[in-house]
Every structure is written in C-alpha cells, then in structure tokens.
C-alpha cells in the first residue's frame, strides 16, 4: 500500500499516540530505522518503513466506515453537550460570585426542574442530558440574562 507523504505522517502520529511512545522513544525509533529524527525529513519510502514497523509493534489500522448522512439525536450532539456544560459553568460561576447560595449540580437540577415545571406542569426532569435541546438552549439564555442582571446589581430572582 503506497500512500502520500502526508498520509504516512498522519498514520505514524496516530500510531505513536496509540502505542504511547514518549517523544524520546519515538525520535530514537525513527533514528534507528532511518537515521533521521523527524518524519518531515524522510521520503515516502522511509515513512513506509516506519509505518510498517509500527504496525509490527501491534498498531492496528482501523478503516472508517462510510458515513451515512442521517439526523443525529440531540443527546449525542457535541453542541448540545456543550450547552449543558455552559449551563453548569455559569451556575458555578454565579455561586462563586455570591449570587447563588449553592453551586452544586443538585441545586442546578432543582432550578431546571422548577423552570421546566413552570412551563409544563407534568414534566419530570431527572437529568439535564435528557432534556430536549431547545429547552437547554432556552434555560442557558435565561441563566445568562439572570447573570448579567446580577452583575449590574439588579436583585437576584433565582
């Protein structure tokens, strides 16, 4: 299998990470095989030798399957998880600055439950990750607005 120079370098870096080689071991490994300490100084044939030696050291190349275009569920979406993390960070920051008596995840969940029940009396919230994305975004914007009001000195209504 003959690949481009950049692809060999990419695969060698991945294999180095998976084999947990330190920088010292890695450069010595390259030097022993090719007489060079950097992949960028090597030609394609030398890179192929290094890559095949790493494969011999038990590095397994995993081919990615063709990605099928489909709609992802929000529970696994990175932007959704980032929104939940932002919600937690703002909650904790408000607690550190004294706007909240308790900055724990439990108190955040209680606040979220109260906000969701205000809109839907029958709603039950056990975990933030189970909320629909639009609810998390709405709560995030609500908490940001409340934080800005607290910083301006307007009374805290949480």
Image: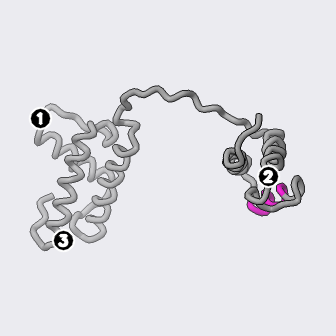
Instruction: Report x, y in % for residue 13.
Output: 69, 51
Residue tagged 1: 121
Q: Could you tell me which residue is drawn at 66 percent across and 34 percent down?
A: 62
- Give the left or right position of residue 155, taking residue 86 as reference: left
Q: Decide: marks 1, 3 in contact (CB < 8 A)?
A: no
- Magenta region: 23-30
Marks 2 and 1 sit apart, C-alpha to C-alpha, by 67 Å
Residue tagged 2: 43
Circle 1: element type = loop
Marks 2 and 3 sit apart, C-alpha to C-alpha, by 59 Å
Q: Residues within 10 Å of mark 3 (few under 14, many from 20)?
A: some
Instruction: Report x, y in % for residue 5.
Output: 71, 48
Q: Could you tell me which residue is drawn at 30 percent across and 68 percent down?
A: 96
**Residue 89 covered by magenta stretch:** no
Among the 4 quarters of the image, the one containing residue 90: bottom left
Circle 2: element type = loop
The quadrant of the rendering that contains the C terminus is bottom left
Marks 1 and 3 sit apart, C-alpha to C-alpha, by 31 Å
In the rendered structure, find residue 132 and report the number of the disc placed on it.
none
Q: Nearer the viewer, residue 65 or 59?
A: 65
Q: Residues within 10 Å of mark 2 (few under 14, many from 20)?
A: few
Among the 4 quarters of the image, the one containing residue 37: bottom right
Q: Nearer the viewer, residue 158 or 83?
A: 83
Instruction: Report x, y in % for residue 43.
Output: 79, 52
Q: Residues within 10 Å of mark 1 (few under 14, many from 20)?
A: few
Q: Could you tell me which residue is drawn at 36 percent across and 31 percent down?
A: 73
N-terminal of the two: label 2 or label 3?
A: 2
Residue tagged 3: 151
- Give the left or right position of residue 35, taking residue 97 as reference: right
- Give the left or right position of residue 152, taking residue 125 as reference: left
N-terminal of the two: label 1 or label 3?
A: 1
């Amino acid at each position: 299998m003959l690949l481009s120079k950049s692809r060999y370098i990419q695969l060698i870096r991945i294999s180095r990470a998976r084999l947990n080689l330190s920088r010292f071991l890695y450069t010595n490994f390259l030097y022993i095989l090719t007489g060079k300490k950097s992949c960028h100084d090597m030609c394609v044939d030398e890179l192929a030798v290094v890559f095949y030696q790493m494969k011999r050291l038990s590095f397994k190349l995993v081919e990615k399957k063709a990605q099928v275009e489909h709609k992802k569920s929000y529970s696994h979406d990175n932007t959704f998880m980032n929104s939940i993390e932002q919600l937690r960070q703002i909650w904790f920051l408000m607690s550190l600055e004294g706007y909240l008596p308790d900055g724990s995840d439990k108190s955040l969940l209680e606040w979220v439950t109260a906000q969701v029940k205000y809109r839907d009396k029958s709603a039950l919230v056990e975990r933030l990750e189970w909320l629909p994305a639009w609810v998390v975004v709405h709560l995030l914007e609500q908490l940001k607005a409340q934080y800005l009001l607290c910083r301006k000195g307007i009374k805290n209504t949480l």
